[in-house]
Image (cartoon, rainbow, N blue to C red):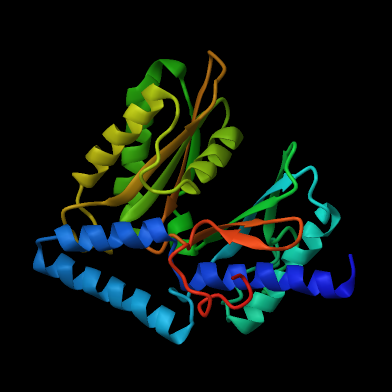
Amino acid sequence: MDKELRNRFVDIVADFTATTGIYLPDDVEMKLRELAAEESRSEAKTMYECILRNIEEAAGLGRPLCQDTGVLQFFAGVGTGFPYMDEIGSVIKEATVKSTLETPLRPNVVEPLGEHNTGTNEGYGAPYIQYDLIPGSSDLRLRLYMAGGGCSLPGRSKVLMPLEGIEGIRRFVYETVVEWGANACPPLMIGIGLGTCAETSALLSKMALLRPIGTHSSYPKVAELEDEIRSDLDSIGIAPLGFGGSKTVLGVNIEAAGHHPATLGVGITTGCWATRRGEIIIHDDLSVDIISHRRLKSGDIRCLL
């Protein structure tokens, strides 16, 4: 890959990272405005006004929505025909450093156990990159999640006895949100994973969090549970920002996989009101399609449009 093309690739990922930190994805902002319009309690309405002003100020100043820009987690769906497959990891790391310095992003990455801050958001095992191969495609589908400290605190994964069933799943989710949800700046985006073990359930819960608000599982029983849990969590009424109101969540998404008959793994991942996730498609000629932020104009995201 020649230098000019590589620089272009790095700029795309760096600008995509900056965009994800500055602007909410379309579905999250739309849901926040919907909740704000529906809210009747005066204290809650005031908090939503603060949130919406925060969104506008970030866009106007070109600065991140929240001082905690998280630890960057990239999910790369790599087409087997994508010509720059070998460059993806190093490009993401270089783009992370570039975006950290230029956006700027708060340096959050500390090395394992030593607690030394690298100052660049790049370090041992960071940023996190997960790869999945997409046969027959020549595109790179790149998704990014900014995992902030407060919204990561409620993360849990547990293996239940299978006889605990749906009631056990509900109990685990409700206890987690009641105990920790107010710390994660609600309204919350809830991702739930159902699988065999703690690891697969946790990963599935992160994949669920990356799905747009309003989408449903293709498995009918799981889709029904999504709606039930969302309704029940809303009845707790801890949003916005833990001050109390009519709702709790932006949405509830569940990703499930067939599990062992002797185990029922459950994982939960939460996003705060500023659920900062992005998705773009990078084609083999390095042109891009922005999936998560379609409302933005070319002036908002430098090299992407």
Comparing 206 with 262, the one in front is: 206
Q: Do we see residue 69 in this rendering?
A: no
Asked whether residue 135 is in view, the answer is yes
Residue at position x 52%, y 80% in the image: 299
Res. 13 image quadrant: bottom right
Whether residue 249 is situated above or below residue 170 in the rendered picture: below
What residue is drawn where x is 90% and y is 70%?
2
Going by the picture, which residue comes out furthest to the right? Answer: 2
- Residue 79, given in percent of the width and then of the height, sits at 74, 45
Measured as percent of width and height from the top left, residue 83 is found at 83, 53
Residue drawn at point x = 63 percent, y = 83 percent: 102
Whether residue 14 sits left or right of residue 84 in the image: it is left
Horizontal side of residue 262 vs 268, given as left or right: right
Q: Is residue 164 above or below residue 74?
A: above
Q: Quadrant of the C terminus?
A: bottom right
Residue in view at x 60 percent, y 68 percent: 16
Q: Nearer the viewer, residue 51 or 194?
A: 51
Image quadrant where one finds the N terminus: bottom right
Residue 171: percent from left, percent from top: 32, 32
Q: Is residue 205 above or below residue 102?
A: above
Q: Which of 258/281 is in front?
A: 281
